[in-house]
Amino acid sequence: SSGINAEWSLRPGLELIEKYKFPSLFINQFFPRPGTPAARMKKIPADKVKLRTKKASEIFQKQFPYTHKLGEVQQILVTEIATDNKHYVGHNKFYDQVLVPKIEGYMGQSLTVRIMETGKHYLKGDVIEEGEIQNIPSSYSNPNKVAFSLNPYNMVQNIKTKSNVWNFLIVLVIGVMFQLLYILYRNHR
């Protein structure tokens, strides 16, 4: 919406970025497709569009969305080697990247970790326990805030082989999608 001539279109977007501290954000300048109603709208000058894009980017770049997770105990599934080649990357139930030491045997495994460091785009965890997926209470299971809980870790009780990793990932993605849909529904009522 940064190219449409409406001042109100920028403010709510910036407020959303500030309020929710999104872990990732795609900031794109508006491009009106020919033949659409938007193509007939008055365009904002390019310098104003660039300034708006810069404002949104500046707010996002100053935020560190994971600091509140320091000290949390989380369940992760290790799925890949980090770009630094010194860590493995695991994902928690929110699909956040959690880095753990690159130790033989961790790939494809479920690990319980304590979050010891956070960065702009990652969490770093110390391994507490290897093995089966545990039912770890979630800070998002407050019955006063969420009408239902779709926790993939409750759905998948035991992952022992790498052949089950894909099944786990599918359940994880479905769970995250349902949680995002519920958040969107709750915020737009």
Image (spheres, rainbow, N blue to C red):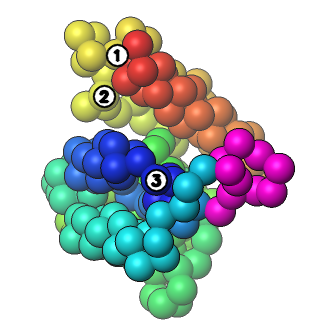
Residue drawn at x 25%, y 65% as measured from the top left:
59
* Callout 1: SS: loop
Q: Nearer the viewer, residue 87 or 7?
A: 7
Image x and y of residue 87, in percent: 46, 80
Q: Left or right of 104: which side holds 118?
A: left
Q: Amino acid at mark 3?
A: Asn
Residue 188 lies in what quarter of the image? top left
From which residue to which does the magenta span run? 31-40
Residue drawn at x 83%, y 50% as measured from the top left:
35
Residue 99 can be seen, yes or no: no
Q: Nearer the viewer, mark 3 or mark 1?
A: 3
First of labels 1, 2 by sequence position: 2
Q: Which residue is mark 2?
A: 140
| Residue 87 falls inside the magenta stretch | no
First of labels 3, 1 by sequence position: 3
Image x and y of residue 135, in percent: 40, 29
Image x and y of residue 187, in percent: 37, 23
Residue 133 can be seen, yes or no: yes
Q: Which residue is mark 3?
A: 5
**On screen, 175 above or below 72?**
above
Q: Left or right of 171: which side holds 98?
A: left
Q: CA distance from mark 3 to mark 2?
A: 39 Å
Which secondary structure is most common in the magenta stretch? loop
**On screen, 144 above or below 154?**
above
Verify CB contact (< 8 Å) between mark 1 and mark 2: yes
Q: Nearer the viewer, mark 3 or mark 2?
A: 3
Give me the disc on residue 171: none
Q: How many marks?
A: 3
Residue drawn at x 29%, y 69% as measured from the top left:
55
